[in-house]
Image: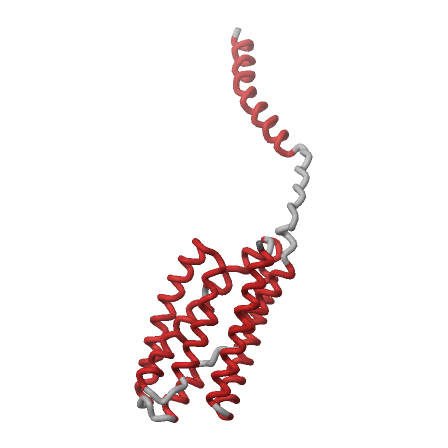
Amino acid sequence: MQIRAAADGHAAYSTPATSASAAISSTRSPRPRPRPRPCPRPCPCRRRDEFWVYAAFAGATLAGFATFGVLSYHLVERQLLPTAAVPVLYAAAMGVDGLAALATGWAYDRIGPRVLTVLPFLAMAMVVLAFTDTTGLVIGGVLPWGAAMGVQESTLRATVADLVPPGRRATAYGLFAAVIGSAMLLGGVLAGALYAYSIPVLIGVTVAVQVLALVLLAATRSRRT
């Protein structure tokens, strides 16, 4: 009787272990992988053209954007502000930068890339106001500069994730960063050279480049629809 009871006990304990082993084995058994569904036409997974048109827009709007170095030089060289006040004005522009980043990020989640239309207009407003000889207008131009910086540093990059499939986003962001970095370098050099040559020419070239940027942004939107 004792031997039979012991056998029954072993059987009772071994049943759950056998079931667990079977469950583990079933999870390791090969199963057919689901076939990827074909993308609809036009295929959202093939947006190479849209990405490069969008990168061209970003490059254009940044190439036509004066750096704060040129702005601060104008302020001091024309004696519109004392040198000690320039960092204070820059701090105010950075405050606008943060607010603009929050506002355009919120708007992007609701209306998409259309919110980026504001960027070329901010750049045009900045160059028209900031490169004058009136202190109030110059200060009014530096604040749009801060707002444009906020859009550039945050919302401008958001569209890349919408244009590129997940498996290629890291490469796309690297390429995009290279484009905008090169454009910012070109924009700084261009603004400095044009400022030394003629301020009206600087304003005219900046406006023309930003109009081109608006055209490229419209082309990006038309390709996505």
Q: Position of residue 134 (x, y in %)?
A: 33, 87
Residue 127 quadrant: bottom left
Q: Position of residue 208 (x, y in %)?
A: 53, 78
In the displayed image of the protein, which residue is found farthest to the top?
A: 1
Query: Between residues 62 and 171, which one lies in front from this camera angle?
Result: 62
Q: Position of residue 192 (x, y in %)?
A: 50, 87
Taking the image as shown, residue 29 lies to the left or right of residue 132, namely right
The residue depicted at 67 percent of the width and 37 percent of the height is 33
Q: State the quadrant of the C terminus.
A: bottom right
Residue 40 quadrant: top right
Specify how the rendered protein is coloured: secondary structure
The residue depicted at 35 percent of the width and 71 percent of the height is 96
207 versus 16 height, above or below? below
79 versus 7 height, above or below? below
Query: Between residues 94 and 135, which one lies in front from this camera angle?
Result: 135
Taking the image as shown, residue 162 lies to the left or right of residue 95, namely right
